[in-house]
Amino acid sequence: MRFIFKTDYNQDVKLAKHGGHVFWYSLLGLLLVAAPWVVAEYWLAQLTFVLIYAVVGLGLMLLAGFTGLFSLGHAAFLGVGAYTQAVMVNAGVPFPLALVCAGLFSAIVGVIVGLPALRVKGIYLGMATLAFGFIVEEGMARWEGVTGGNTGLSVGYPAIGGWTLDSTEEFYFLCLLVTVGATLAIVNLLRSSTGRAFVAIRDSEISAQSMGIHLARYKTLSFALSAALAGIGGALYAHKIQFLSPEQFSIIQSIDLLLMVVIGGLGSIHGAFLGAIFLIVMPQLISMGKDFLPAAIGGAAGLQGTVYGMVLIAFVLFEPMGLYGRWLKVRTWFQLFPFYRRGLFKRQKSFQKSDRLK
Amino acid sequence: MQLLQLLISGVAQGCIYGLIALGFVLIYKATETVSFAQGDLMMVGAFSGLAAMTLLGFSFWIAVPSAIVAMGIFGVLLERLVIRPILGQPAFSIVMLTIGVGYVLRGLITMIPDVGTDTHTLPVPYAGEVLRLGTLVIAAEQMVVIGATGILCLSLFAMFKYSKLGIAMQAASQNQLAAYYMGIPVKQINGLVWGLAAAVAAVAGLLLAPITFVHANMGFIGLKAFPAAVVGGFGSLPGAIVGGLVIGIVESFSGFYLPEGFKDIAPYIVVLLMLVLKPNGLFGEQLRKKV
């Protein structure tokens, strides 16, 4: 059991709360930097995907996990960022400038979508973002002059001046840099007054409003930041996958992104990363597990969807805090050993919260 | 005449949307959550009708009621097994749960060897027949859809208005705690509402089957029923049907008069406009949250 004795107010705002944080995050950082020399190229590519999805997941976590607004059309922002990046890079714009533009453009689109969000809440917001997602997907398929329509659009390597990042390792380091930057930005945002306002809105709109938080402004800001991160993730995704077509940004992708933050654990930064790892590793595990199953089950087309659905149901039923919640329990068990009690994390029974007039 | 033709096909399609939206609204009124599995329940309903007719060899008139009853029981079981344990959690958990249920249903149907990945036709007795009125051509499938929706709506209306069970459902959806104090078994009522929603979905699936074929991905049409439910106002049963008709007619007309591609997104443009102009829908009541 670790006790932190606070002797200074600055300890409250420090990012690393104690020596354990410093040690473990440094070790993680070292491992990530050393990864290109340690792991095989295939797994390095998978790790790159984890980092890209983690950036998108951070954005969605900010919106869903910390502001309490659920978006069912987040793949649209991913798509907007990806196509912006593709078109600009293909037109010869330097890579960093295109990345910034992809983020900015997605943020602007996010603000536009955020506008109806000011009037509607709960499930209506989900419907609005769902509708928006469909419209953007159709737009990407139909605006053939820019996006190439359903035939798709190929994307070149990221290039700065004469330097082209065309190897897996170089691109991995680029993604690592962007991911670390995004994570630090979000962590810092969440301990600022803006981040506190987001959390207050999530917990209760009415009490947040009566504390003087401008709901409309902060909700729009949350949408914009979330969309910007999705756009940046989309830009990296475009370079990684090198070929864009509208069906990559369909409702299925949006649901996958939501699944990522829910399984990772809503309301935790770690959750975005754990969810991204889950999203990338799960198909690999399923294809590995296929060999051990009878051919009739292992070879069936619907296996992946079934497993995804079952995992999702199991998490919602048994571990609503997601993978991060499970890790918290395991950690507490070790910290308190042998005094862990079963009821330690038991949720209070609550009546169904109702938005209706009582 | 062309106008009338478009109108009829729009109404027929709209009835399907309306029936699926009816399922959303029933569940929303009872448990204040949105079931994303509704489209997939419809798909399973169509498949169970198909199984009853081809595997078990039932005639059409026995297969249809048995499929509907089977789906009703399935809905009750679903509520008991996965929905009831998490009631009281944030609404979004239940949304994710129903998304999961939808994934599992679609995956399991796809996994059935030789059947799941193919498209099938439901052998209905009225297939391919048309009614000609002057230059107007109406397919029998469309007339059956419109007629069956009308009958179903009337019987649901009668049930909610006159039967004890219907009134209990209304009471439970208006205020669960008060209904509980009045001696209404709210939990069982919730289960029955899920059963009813699944049965309605099965009806929609059986009506849609002769028009679009039966396949594992037919549940995606449920995504177009969301706009229907929103346009009608999420808490209103007649609103769901009216919203479905609006979406169906808009879709049918935009497919004819607007450039290609607008047909698929017209419902979503309508729903965005609706959310900006009149967020509570056509029939939704104005509600305000109190502290």
Image: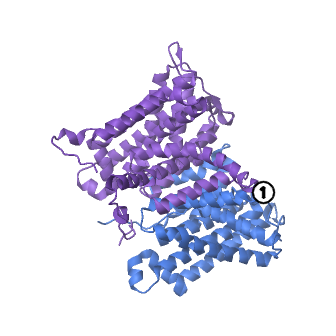
Question: Which residue occupies 55% across, 37% down?
Answer: A79
> Residue lying farthest left?
A7
Does residue B115 appear in the picture of this structure? yes
Q: Is residue B290 above or below residue A8?
A: below
Q: Position of residue A45 (x, y in %)?
A: 57, 32
Report the side of A202 relative to A106 (left or right).
Answer: left
Q: Examine the rendering and report whether any part of residue B281 can be seen.
A: no
SS category of the residue bearing label 1: loop
Is residue A84 or residue A41 the one in the foreground? A41
Determine the residue positioned at 57% across, 30% down: A240
Q: Three-letter amino acid code at disc 1?
A: Thr
Q: Quadrant of residue A332?
A: bottom left
Tell me which residue sits at (60%, 37%) in the image.
Answer: A140
Q: Residue at x 66, y 58 (%)?
A: B106
Picture coordinates of residue A128, whole percent (x, y): 49, 52
- Tell me the shade of chain B: blue
Chain ID of residue with mark 1: B
Q: What residue is disc 1 on?
A: B119
Report x, y in % for residue B42: 66, 65
The tint chain A carries is purple
